[in-house]
């Protein structure tokens, strides 16, 4: 099935040619997420040590970066990443953000922008999307904005959609394949039980799935060159945005698991099985056979 997203609006294209080569301006949204694999829980209180868990590039955003690099390799142009710092404590995180953003640059991004302001800590998706949208407008827009379908820490899956709405441009979600032909972007959307083929004109926002590609590892030369690439840190005042985050976390606790240590006894395997089933029925784990 082929569908045209938002066909009523005609967009002014920002593609341009230089020496016969098509150049594309691309923005990648990169979440500096909590590394949940290194998140520890206080056994006495059940609360996670969030402030001690390091930041990392959100997993699916790596695919978004790789896809942007592949498009640039084919069509030329420039790639900028935009990240919003939302995890406290502010002083620690703003320093810690340097390493993952340098990794982003090593992966092929030309310039990284970090929106860092204490008012953004614990920001909700609406607030995060609004400041990202403001930065994109300050940059003059882009031909293509790419993001992961969700992030490993929140996985709301709505920031890309909110950015598209804020910019009033088409949105393609859950893309597992993307192809740019002139001013038309063609994508395959993964909708679990079937694949949907869609196309629209650019500028547009595309959110990608894990299946779209396998990100390459940066070479030693790319890692060394990343040190010289621009990494800008900007505040809300610089982009002239006022925010009022809606999320006010009151408590965060890990899942508590307690074993009952019940011993099932029986002289034969059949008796053991019967006693186990009886116990599971008594506990309400399974329903008795009628």
Image (spheres, rainbow, N blue to C red):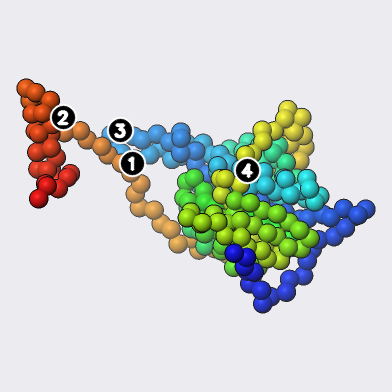
SS at mark 2 in the image: loop
Q: At 57% from the left edge and 45% from the top edge, which residue is drawn?
A: 211
Query: Badge 3, how many Cα within 10 Å: few under 14, some, many 20+?
Result: few
Query: Badge 4, how many Cα within 10 Å: few under 14, some, many 20+?
Result: some
Tell me which label, 2 or 4, sits earlier in the chain. Answer: 4
Q: Which residue is mark 4?
A: 213
Q: Split into 4 quadrants, where in the image is the N terminus?
A: bottom right
* Image disc number at residue 261: 2
Q: Nearer the viewer, residue 127 or 258?
A: 258
Asked if the residue under mark 4 is in contact with the one under mark 1, i.e. CB atoms within 8 Å, the reply is: no
Query: Badge 1, how many Cα within 10 Å: few under 14, some, many 20+?
Result: few
Left or right of residue 255: residue 74: right
Tell me which label, 4 or 3, sits earlier in the chain. Answer: 3
SS at mark 1 in the image: loop
Q: At 79% from the left edge and 63% from the top edge, which residue is drawn?
A: 14
Image coordinates for residue 197, horizontal then vertical, percent: 61, 60
Q: Indicate which label's residue lies in the foreground, 4 or 3.
A: 4
Q: Which residue is mark 1?
A: 254
Q: Height in image: 122 above or below 106?
A: below
Farthest residue in the right direction? 19
Q: Nearer the viewer, residue 138 or 7?
A: 7
Q: Is residue 113 visible?
A: no
C-alpha span from label 2 to label 4:
46 Å
* Image-quadrant location for residue 96: top right
Tell me which label, 1 or 2, sits earlier in the chain. Answer: 1
Q: Nearer the viewer, residue 34 or 286?
A: 286
Q: Which residue is mark 3?
A: 43
C-alpha span from label 1 to label 4:
33 Å
Q: Indicate which label's residue lies in the foreground, 3 or 1.
A: 1
C-alpha span from label 4 to label 3:
39 Å
C-alpha span from label 3 to label 1:
9 Å
């Amino acid at each position: 099935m082929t569908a045209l997203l938002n066909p009523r609006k005609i967009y002014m294209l920002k593609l341009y040619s230089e020496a016969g080569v098509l150049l594309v301006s691309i923005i990648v949204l990169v979440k500096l997420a909590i590394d949940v694999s290194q998140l520890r829980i206080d056994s006495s209180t059940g609360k996670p040590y969030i402030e001690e868990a390091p930041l990392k590039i959100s997993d699916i955003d790596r695919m978004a970066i790789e896809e942007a690099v592949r498009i640039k390799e084919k069509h030329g142009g420039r790639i900028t990443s935009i990240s919003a710092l939302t995890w406290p404590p502010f002083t620690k995180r703003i320093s810690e953000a340097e390493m993952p953003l340098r990794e982003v640059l090593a992966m092929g991004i030309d310039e990284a922008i970090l929106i860092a302001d204490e008012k953004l800590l614990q920001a909700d998706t609406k607030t995060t999307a609004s400041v990202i949208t403001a930065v994109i407008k300050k940059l003059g827009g882009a031909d293509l904005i790419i993001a992961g379908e969700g992030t490993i820490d929140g996985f709301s899956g709505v920031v890309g959609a909110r950015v598209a709405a804020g910019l009033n441009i088409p949105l393609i979600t859950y893309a597992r394949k993307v192809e740019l032909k002139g001013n038309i972007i063609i994508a395959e959307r993964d909708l679990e039980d079937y694949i949907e083929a869609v196309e629209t004109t650019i500028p547009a926002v595309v959110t990608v799935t894990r299946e779209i590609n396998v990100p390459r590892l940066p070479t030693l030369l790319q890692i060394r060159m990343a040190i010289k690439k621009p990494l800008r840190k900007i505040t809300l005042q610089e982009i002239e945005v006022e925010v009022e985050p809606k999320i006010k976390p009151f408590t965060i606790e890990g899942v508590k698991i307690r074993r009952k240590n019940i011993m099932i006894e029986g002289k034969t395997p059949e008796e053991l099985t019967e006693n186990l089933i009886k116990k599971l029925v008594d506990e309400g784990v399974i329903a008795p056979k009628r």
